[in-house]
Each structure stands twice: as C-alpha cells, then as structure tokens.
Image (cartoon, rainbow, N blue to C red):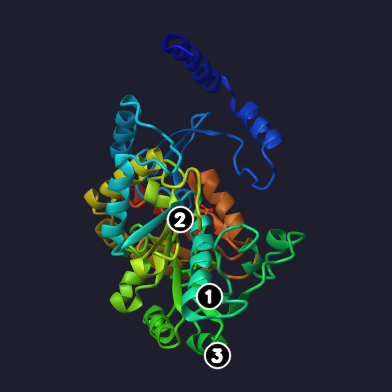
Amino acid sequence: MDQATAQREAATILAAADALGADEATAMIRQYFAPNYSLILDDPVVKAEGPWLYTRNGNKIFDGVAAYSAANLGHGHPLVREVLKGFLDAQQPTVLGRFLGNPYMGLFGKKICELSGFERFLPANGGVEGPEAAIKLARRWAHKVKGVKGTAEILYAEGCFHGRTTTVTQMFGDDEPEAKEGFGPWTPGFRRIPFNDLAALEAAITDTTAAVLIEPIQGEGGINVPDEGHLAAVCKLCKERNVLVIFDEVQTGWARTGNMFCWMHEGEAARPDIMAIGKSVSGGYAPVAGILADNVLMELMDAGSHGSTFGGCPISSAIGYASLVAIEQEDLVAQAREKGAYVRERLEAIAAKSPRIETVRGRGLMFGIEVTKEDPDANAFSKKLLKMGAVIKGTHRWVLRFTPPIVATRDDLDHVLGLIEQAFVPE
Ligand SMILES: Cc1ncc(COP(=O)(O)O)c(C=O)c1O
C-alpha cells in the first residue's frame, strides 16, 4: 500500500471509530468478544489521560484501579508517547525474529537489570508469562542443579493470583469455581500452602521442592499484606533448604507499594532468586512482562529452551525502555510513598466514620478497603462509585481495591477520596 492510500484509509478507520455510538460499540463488543469479561459500563472509553478516562457519552471517570496497576504512570504518559512516535517515524522494525537484534532491546535489557538489580531479563508479553517462565526455570534448576529426580514441586500460596494459563489456573481457591470449573486436569507438581505462614512453608518443603511462588502482597486475593519480615524469613528458610524463591511482582512492582519492588521494603535479605514482572513496565502501552534473575540461574535458559515471538521485540523494548526512564524521572517511588501516606490517613478517617468499613490495608498506593460482611457487598459499593464517577473494583466479595495511578495529583486524589467518603459515610 502506498503512503497516500494508507493515509486515506487510516482517516476512514479513525472516522469510523469516532462515529460509532456508545450503544453500538458496546453491543459489538458484547456480541463479538468472548463473554469472559462483563462490561460494567455501556459507554466506551474514548480518551484517557493520566488518571482520567473520558467516555463516548461525555462522562469523566477516575481510574481508581489504574488498569489493574498497568497504568502506574497514568494513561498515555507523554514521554512514552514521544518515544513511540519517534520510533515509528524512524521506521524502526516493530518486530523481528528473535535471531535478530535492535538497539532498543539493548537499552531496555540494560535498564531493567539496573533498576531491578538482577543480571538478566527474560522478556515476555502478558503478565502470566512471568510466573510461567519462572516455573520452567525453577524446574530446570531443580532437575539440572539440585538433582531432583522425577517431579520437582512448586509450592504456592492460598489466595494467590498468578494468571490464567492451564498451569496456574489450578491455584485459584475453591471459592472461585467460575475460574476453575471444567478446565482440568491440572498440571502435576504443585502444592498449596497457607499464605504468610512460615511454619507451614517449612513443613511443606521436601527434597524434591524446586521453589516457592509468592506475591509479596496478594492483589487479586484481597490486598493481603504478609507480616513484617515474612518475605525475608521465607528467603532465609529457602536458602537453608536449597529451594528457590519466586516473587510475582507483576502487580506490586514498579513503585506501586512505595518501593521499586515490594520485597525491597525488607531489604536485600528479601531478594528473591527469580522475580516476575509485567503491567507498568510498559507504561500501559503494550503487553510487556518477563522474569529477572542472576546469571547463575538465567544461564540455564539456553538457546531453544524458551521463547516468544513478540517477547522483547523492538517496539516492546522501545516502550519498555521509555517507561522505565519515565518511572525514574517521575520518581514514582517517592510519589507512591508520599501520596500513599496521605491516602491512607484519609481512608482511615473515612473508615472511622463509616459503619460499613471493617478495615483498610495495603502499602504505598495499593489499598484494600474491606467492607463488613453484610449486604450491600463490595461489588455494590463499586457500582455506586462508578455512578459517582470512579472505577474502584471489588476483589472477591468483601474487598474494594483502590490502586490509583501514582501520578494522580493531590487534587485528583482529594476528588476521588471525596467520592469514597460520600459512598461510605451516612449523611
Ligand atoms: C500477581 C499477578 N501475576 C500475574 C498476573 C497476570 O497478568 P496478565 O493478566 O497480564 O496475564 C496478574 C494480573 O493481575 C497479577 O496480579
């Protein structure tokens, strides 16, 4: 296609999207996309900037979940957008067979290792590919280095969420039958242990244990924060017992909890062997994820052991590199700490006045607002807040997840905290 035709056709496509009314667009999504997600709004989002979403029918909504922490930098961060424009204008290759390289891959790899303190990065796409790759690496280590014969077991925590592939789907609890029903049989080699229970972990470890897989704060499970020092204690125990530690920082990473990664709150003693990352590593611009580890482990992933057509491709690397620079330049860690302390104070004050809030928990700008176990439940509060102009979603039945974009200003936060107060505090 020549340039003039492309421009004309592109104008037609853009105009068609602009002309599609709210009802029509919603109906098309409902008809043609699989029904595995239900839309909560019959009014599609047509513009997003920072923490704000703008809909076809002219509503302005605060994104209080930051696209499940994929938009820690807010929507449409200008630095990432500028790099992306320059990248496309220069006709850089967007994708290449992984047997070819591109400068952005080098920049991204170096930066992600510098920021995380690990020696190597294995890039992937969707977040679930992180824990998946970590499981493969841990099993390979167990078989080739630890000397496990047969099944090398992975321990995982009750209440966890690591994604939805056939391997990790078994990790959902029995209280979430919709996520598991009919999808078995399950991949062998996994065992559930209670979350935040060192004694249970110790008792579960055997000579064939390869690794323990844990979220440093359980996100989907209800913003469950382990005891102070637990992560470091897990690392110490696993080191003594020759078991790898995998922390899934897909949701807690990239400043969300007030440190670049959540384990860092407990210092080097809590440094995992393998760390899974995703979501905000791309500033919300593309699916970018992967795992980080040191050479001694990552060198086990030799040529042919693993791969992904788009994982680490040039456009993902350009977006990833720009996002990491933005995370640093915005000093997202300091922002999450400072705003997190403010939001916590306000939420606790609201909780003190509301008969319906059982407790507020979290770290940095990652909050769970647990409601008392009576009707209406957290999902009903979520619906009420949406009508008022804020997306704050329930995780499980009794917890609302509030994880605003870290770049939201004090005014933005005051606005949404005002809505939360109206929803929870009786007149
Ligand atoms: C801790 C954790 N791991 C993995 C995933 C899976 O990420 P994705 O939905 O991008 O596959 C999520 C998603 O919410 C998550 O919170």
- The residues tagged by marks 3 and 2 sit, at their Cα atoms, a distance apart of 36 Å
- The residues tagged by marks 3 and 1 sit, at their Cα atoms, a distance apart of 22 Å
- List x then y, in percent, for residue 274: 41, 68
Q: Is residue 292 left or right of residue 115?
A: right
* Mark whose residue sits in front, 3 or 1: 1
Earlier sequence position, callout 3 versus callout 1: 1
- List x then y, in percent, for residue 123: 42, 52
- SS class, disc 1: helix
- SS class, disc 2: loop
Reading the image, the residue beneath label 2 is 303
Q: Which mark is residue 143?
A: 1
Residue lying at 44% horizontally and 48% vertically, measured from the top left: 288
Reading the image, the residue beneath label 3 is 203
- Up the image or down, 181 lies above or below 100; here it is below
Give the amino acid at mark 2: Ala
- List x then y, in percent, for residue 77: 33, 40
Earlier sequence position, callout 3 versus callout 2: 3
